[in-house]
Amino acid sequence: MSDKDLAAGVDLTLIDDVERMVRGTAEMICAEQPDVPQPESLHDLDSFSMVQVLLELENTTQLKLLERFEGFEGETFRDLAEFIVRFTAKDDEQQEASEELREQTTPV
């Protein structure tokens, strides 16, 4: 399964969709490594695999995950999905506010 397949139809505002994408990405990364069992949670990933998962998710979603990951303390795929949904919503709000400000300050 490619990263494009994992991202197809994923609504970054829906935690269940994002959780499936995160889980699928982790399973894909682990399947590519010899003698690495399929993960049941993020806790099952070593640091190398976790970075690979984050980079793959960045490629899939076009989000900057690795630089925001420092404050993340979750252990489950759902925790990471909620983290992604939360900062995606925050980014969307900031972008909308910037666009509104631009419209208000643009001369007619």
Image (cartoon, rainbow, N blue to C red):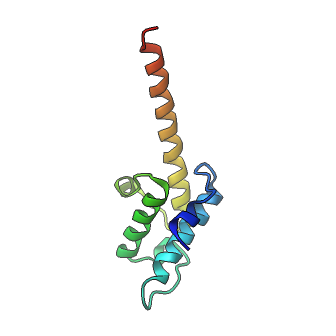
Q: Position of residue 27 (x, y in %)?
A: 53, 77
Do we see residue 78 in this rendering?
no
Count of number-bearing discs: 0
Name which residue lies at 39% across and 70% down: 52
In the image, 50 versus 56, the foreground residue is: 56
Above or below residue 56? Residue 103 is: above
Above or below residue 33? Residue 57 is: above
Which quadrant holds residue 54?
bottom left
Name which residue lies at 51% across and 76% down: 28
Q: Position of residue 68 (x, y in %)?
A: 38, 52
Above or below residue 46? Residue 94 is: above
Residue situated furthest bottom in the rendering: 35
Q: Position of residue 64 (x, y in %)?
A: 40, 52
Above or below residue 61? Residue 4 is: below
Do we see residue 40 in this rendering?
yes
Q: Position of residue 8 (x, y in %)?
A: 60, 59
Residue situated furthest top in the rendering: 108
Question: Quarter holding the N terminus?
Answer: bottom right
Name which residue lies at 42% across and 14% down: 105
In the image, 15 versus 104, the foreground residue is: 104
Left or right position of 12 against 33: right
In the image, 76 versus 20, the foreground residue is: 20
Name which residue lies at 56% across and 60% down: 7
